[in-house]
Amino acid sequence: MGFDLHGLNPSGKENVEALEDVGPSGFFDESAESEWKAEAQAGVYFRNNVWYWRPLWAYVGETCDDILTLKDYQYGQSNDGHVINAEKAIAIGERLRETMHNYDKIAERLKESIKSLSKDYTFDKENIEEFANFCINSGGFSIW
């Protein structure tokens, strides 16, 4: 299972229009991964498998509990098309950037609770930074 986030009004779409179809095999293809990262940077598209998304979204919930509603947080854990509007997306991205200096402390606290769910969940600082960039440039996003 994976989570695919699509920017609603991406600010950098013109920079990646040639990258429209990066298939699921892109995780193992270095050039496709580079294209996917360019799309995330531009706010067009961001993806994570469940093992990356759950810890990332928990990190967002921990650091952005005053930005997200309970409904946003709960629906963000499923891929049913929930929409995070542009104002919230920018606020999430900015907050994630602001809290990166506390990443180790926050991640360690969350790792303990997430490990009790599954040892396969993965925390990744680079993933959080890429998600922050996606949020800021997405114009809002939907979670599929």
Image (cartoon, grey):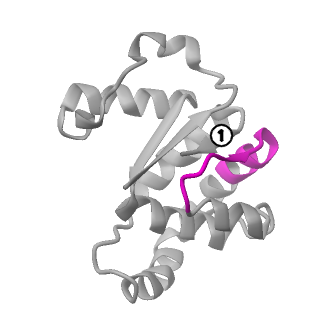
Taking the magenta stretch, the answer to whether it contains residue 129 is no
Task: State whether residue 124 appears in this view.
Answer: no
**Residue toward you, 85 or 79:** 79
Establish if 73 lies above or below 86: below
Q: From the top left corner, tell me how far across and down residue 126 is, in percent.
A: 40, 52
Report whether 74 appears left or right of 116.
right
Q: Assess whether residue 83 is covered by the magenta stretch.
A: yes
In this picture, which residue range is highlighted in magenta? 78-93
Residue 99: x and y in percent read 62, 63
Drawn side of residue 48 relative to residue 100, left or right: left
> Label 1 crowding class (10 Å Cα cut-off): few <14, some 14-19, many 20+?
many
* Residue 123, image x, y percentages: 38, 67
Q: Is residue 79 above or below residue 139?
A: below
The answer to whether residue 88 shows anywhere in this view is: yes
Q: SS for tag 1?
A: strand
Q: Residue furthest front?
A: 80
As rendered, which of 55 and 96 lies closer to the eye?
A: 55
- Is 107 located above or below residue 18 in the figure? below
Residue carrying label 1: 141
Location of residue 27 with respect to 16 vertically, above or below: below
- Residue 39 in the image, given as x and y percentages of width and height: 47, 28
Q: Quadrant of residue 22?
A: top left
Residue at image location 47% in from the left, 87% down from the top:
113
